[in-house]
Amino acid sequence: TTTNNNNSNTSPSSTIINQQLHGFTKSLPKIELHAHLNGSIREHTLIELASERNVTLSPKMILHDAESAQQHNDDSKEERLFWNTHPRFWNTRPRNLQDCFEVFEYIPKCVNDLVALRRITEEVLMDAAEDGVVYIELRTGPKCLLRRHHDDDGSGEGGGIMATKREYVETIVEIMNEFEKKERNRYEMEMECRAQDNMMQQQQIVRLALIPRLIISVDRAGTIEQADENINLAIELFQKQQMLPPGQSKYIVGVELGGNPTRNDFTIFEASFERARRAGLYVAIHIGEVPMKSYDAKYNEALAVINFRPDRLGHALTLSTSLIELLEKNPIPIECCPTSNTMTLDFASHHKGSLIDGIKMHPHLKKWIECNYPISINTDDSGIFCTNLTKEYMLIAKVFELDERKLSEIVLDSVEHAFDDDIKAKLRNDIQSMVEMMV
Ligand code: 6MZ
């Protein structure tokens, strides 16, 4: 069941191997630990919201024009994931880090009210669930959005009035709560149907329910005051949720530092993150997204992040050799995002269009996988990079020649780095039983 075929080979046998790998990878219950909410927006939703709000998206921002986006929408997801049959999906338009941050400036103009926020949160959760993700930590920076975009909605309330950052977070928590219940019911019903239907094979796989959690982001391009505002909100809502009776989900699990890596420095936010940690929140920090030398400011910043000992590091892509050695001696789990990392490395300047060749540029991933460094595989911005977790796992399987067992081990390793401790034992058991059925 290995997957070590030639990457560019599109012979019938490689297509079969791809199909088998796809079937397995999609059914494999997966863990997403690094996904930015607004970066995970569906492209056609972004296009729709932009047109409703008269926002002009530059051609650079759109991966596919409206017609092909619609066509995408009409395709079955199953098909879309096959790069052999759908190269236009596979050969994602390359975006380097600068391109990404240009797009990020436009998204809040389109997701500018709580209605749009509800919509994208639901869609991101639906897409993840449909993709076989069983636990997702979405991360997002709280924003002051309009309650509703249109003044003339007839209700006489809401339009044009700004909502608070707290309402932003509460809206997401509410959706997560509704979604988690719906998913649990769906799972129970499907299990019941399976048990009752003698005709149905007992072996038939019922997709596990998706469990969503939330990480509050701090944007490093912002001020210390803005960071404190988000951290204070996270602490306050985190403490409030501790009062919930046992058995009720507690959605806020951590805080993180992200945003344009060329702006500001971690050290100015360090005290704020220390406060969050003391309050019981887990902490993830983006690190190593721009090149560094052993004596420059980026190196010093990365060293300060490592010495802070966050619970997880995002990317850790461009770290100098001495910093990598430091981590390997005393590991901090790393959130790897293969496609995104490839874009950050600006693979388009090196390889025209082939993500598979691009992933080979990752300076550490192969070694980390081989020597079992604690990692997780993630999408980062599934909308921006036109990806999902199945695709990310298929990519690493193909490039690093990993079999089903190894992919399952990576998923099980990521469970250990999840920020909700109460859920880990259940996830471990559920995933293990499912893998035993599948392999
Ligand atoms: C750093 C990133 C990122 O918070 O509005 N973000 N920060 N590196 C990346 N690598 C590509 N991708 C996304 O989600 C969008 C925000 O997430 C951060 C950026 O600050 C972006 O504006 P939210 O939901």
Image (cartoon, rainbow, N blue to C red):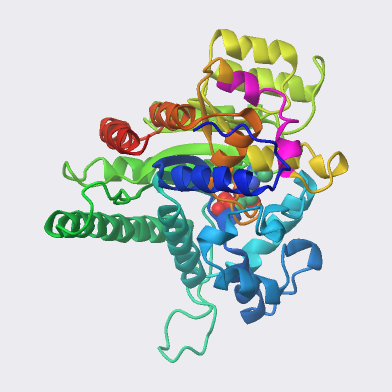
- Near-viewer residue (309 or 408): 408
- Near-viewer residue (8 or 173): 8
Q: Position of residue 108 (x, y in %)?
A: 62, 63
Residue 368 seen in this snapshot = yes
**Residue 99 drawn above or below residue 218:** below
* Quarter residue 335 falls in: top right
Q: Position of residue 197 (x, y in %)?
A: 15, 60
- Near-viewer residue (108 or 128): 128
- For the record, the magenta segment spans 355-369
Q: Position of residue 369 (x, y in %)?
A: 57, 22
Q: Residue at x 61, y 23 (%)?
A: 305
**Residue 190 drawn above or below residue 376:** below
Q: Is 436 covered by the magenta stretch?
A: no
Q: Residue at x 47, y 58 (%)?
A: 127
In the rendered image, the quadrant that contains the C terminus is top left
The answer to whether residue 114 is left or right of residue 267 is left
Q: Residue at x 61, y 76 (%)?
A: 48
The main secondary structure of the magenta stretch is helix
**Residue 216 drawn above or below residue 92:** above
Q: Residue furthest left?
A: 196
Q: Residue at x 71, y 29 (%)?
A: 362
Count of marks overlaid on the render: 0
Q: Position of residue 384 (x, y in %)?
A: 65, 55
- Near-viewer residue (15 or 267): 15
Residue 223 seen in this snapshot = no
Q: Residue furthest top?
A: 329
